[in-house]
Image (cartoon, helix red, strand yellow):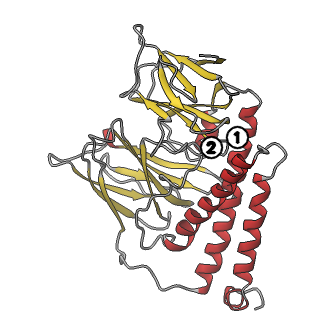
Amino acid sequence: MANAPEQRILDGSSWREFCRALERAGDVILRDASPMDPFDRAEGFRYLSRLTRVALESYIEFADPLAPAFRRPSHETVKIGADNPDIHYQSAAISGNHEYVIRGVRNTVHYLGFGTYVGSYGSGGAMGQSGYLEAADLDIDADGRFEIRVSCEEQPGRNWLPMQPETASLIVRQTYQDRKSERIADLEIERVGGEERPRPITAAFVDQGLAAAATYVNGTAALFADWAEAFAKHPNELRPLDPAVAAAAHGDPNIFYYHGYWELQPGEALLVEVKPPACDYWNFQVNNYWMESLDYRFHHIDVNHHGARYEDDGSLKIVLAERDPGFGNWLETAGHRRGTMCLRWIRAEAHPQPESGVISP
């Protein structure tokens, strides 16, 4: 058949269509509502290169649900959707047609959550969570070891992570409160009754993988550009994100999110004030326009419940500025004049609205 995967690979159609789809992704960066200056545009095209890199890993290198392996879908040089600098993200390709077991050692990381998910950005189908399990709810032995069964069929005990027939991915969030003193959990995953080695490559696998990777790049770029455009309608404000929207974007169900857009002129600063509720964790972070966290390897761009400086009444003053204003919790703009921002807390007892405004310190 003319359109069979074998023929598409032989005549190069698979690759040409992948490249054309990547070209179309550039239109997201060139939208009329997107920043027009060379700095933000350069970051935008770098962002697409990063999405392309992680998409190829997701849909070519680590895409076999018969031989799953944990990888890092977001990290210091791949940043997606207000990625949290405190989180060590991991993911694996899985399928609701199979069962899996996760084996681990808990260690000391502050928060550890496992989620199974349906759909992917840009796929056009259903998106959302099919199961969630937090380490605090696991049965863990005296040595910190545990096993989690991952399946559509309910399993006995507390260590069951549900799937649905349409489930396609597993995401692990290991959240530090202090990276210097905590150790992330040691994790491995395997399919029940299967071999660990991946299957030999096929034309169909690469044909489908390239198409899925291109869809992911386009869909992810468009989704979070839409969010940034919406946030920009209310500059220098933090607004709660609809939990249903967060769930559809593969968020953690225990987290309540606030997002916003910031823009400052030379000499200005953004002051955010809030009294955090009782919760397991909170953080505030600064992102660029494309919703990538700023480079936390070299700049102080986030603060959490563990490292924050509190006022006498337990409230916070967070100051986003080019230079240290000498009060509150200073976060760096890191050479940016605009961007997005995110405040999140885990298992909060309440959701107080943060106040924010531009000041001249």
Give the labeled residue for mark 1.
227
**Pointer 1 or 2: first along the chain:** 1
Q: Give above or below for 250 relative to 23.
A: above
Label 1: element kind: helix
**Tag count in the figure?**
2
User: What residue is drawn where x is 48% and y is 52%?
Assistant: 76
Q: Residue furthest left?
A: 142
**x%, y% of residue 260?**
65, 31
Q: Is the Cβ of the residue at disc 1 closer than 8 Å to that at disc 2?
A: yes
Q: Residue furthest top?
A: 313
Q: CA distance from mark 1 to mark 2?
A: 9 Å
Callout 2 amino acid: Met
Q: Quadrant of the N terminus?
A: bottom right
User: What residue is drawn where x is 61% and y is 86%?
Assistant: 203
Residue 125 can be seen in this image: no
Residue nearest the viewer, comparing 32 with 110: 32
Q: Which mark is residue 247?
A: none
Label 2: element kind: loop
Q: Which mark is residue 291?
A: 2
Q: Quadrant of residue 229?
A: top right
Callout 1 amino acid: Trp
Residue nearest the viewer, comparing 3 with 293: 293
Number of residues whose C-alpha sits closer than 10 Å to that of mark 2, classed few (under 14), some (14–19) or many (20 or more): many
